[in-house]
Image: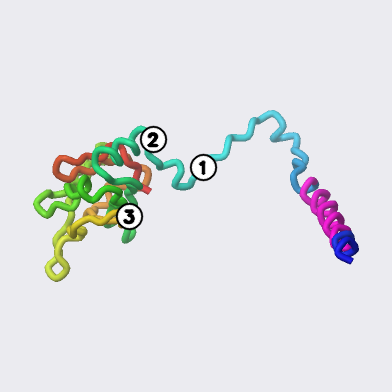
Amino acid sequence: MLKQVILRSRRPLVAILLVSSVVFSGAQSAPPQSSQSAGKPTPAPVWQGSQANRLSGRAEMYYEGVWGVGELRVKTAESGELIRFNYRVLDPNKAAALNDKKAEPKLFDAQAKVSLVVPQLEKVGKLRQESTPKAGMTYWMAFSNPTRAVKRGHHVDVVIGSFRANNLVVE
């Protein structure tokens, strides 16, 4: 009985596989080219995702080993008026320097020739997290960019006390 059930269930599966292979092979065939584009090579597609903004493996190992942080990201926020710096704490003892209240964070953009600071608002305080770091948590700070000089695609350096993250790409 079990053998009959298995044989009956295989036939629809084989039919589905056959039909799907015909459909997908037709979808993968190239469309005919016109005579105008026959002589011109098509440009390679550009990857627009966050993979293009990743740090090198060596840089990631440095930040993880020396500073106890990983997943460093710099993004625009609030229509470009704020630049947000995020990092994930891997080793709280090493990462304590980044959350030090006495250290004044700065963001340098050589292309725009500006230096940004973390603003202090009257009712909110500084736009950064200064609590004791915990492993696995993501922390952030926001830099004021009122002239919108720092834009997506710019390479920036973030300095917090003796910590320095070089050549981060603004997303």
The residue range painted magenta reads 8-25
Furthest-left residue in view? 102
Q: Observer-nearest residue: 9 or 154?
A: 9
- Assign the magenta stretch its main secondary structure: helix
Name which residue type carries label 1: Trp
Display colour scheme: rainbow
Distance between the alpha carbons at the discs numbered 2 and 3: 21 Å
Q: Relative to 108, is 42 on the left or the right?
A: right
User: Which residue is nearer to you in this view: 123 or 147?
Assistant: 123
Disc 2 is placed on an element classified as loop
Q: Which residue is mark 3?
A: 136
Q: Reading the chain from its start, which is encountered first: label 2 or label 3?
A: 2
Query: Which residue is label 1 attached to?
Result: 47
In which image quadrant can residue 146 be found? Answer: bottom left
Q: How packed is label 3: few (under 14 Cα within 10 Å), some, or many (20 or more)?
A: few
Residue 49 at x, y percent in the picture:
48, 47
Residue 141 position in % (x across, y down): 24, 55
- Report x, y in % for residue 23: 80, 52
Task: Indicate the amino acid at tag 3.
Answer: Gly
Sooner in the amino-acid sequence: mark 3 or mark 1: 1
Q: Is residue 15 magenta?
A: yes
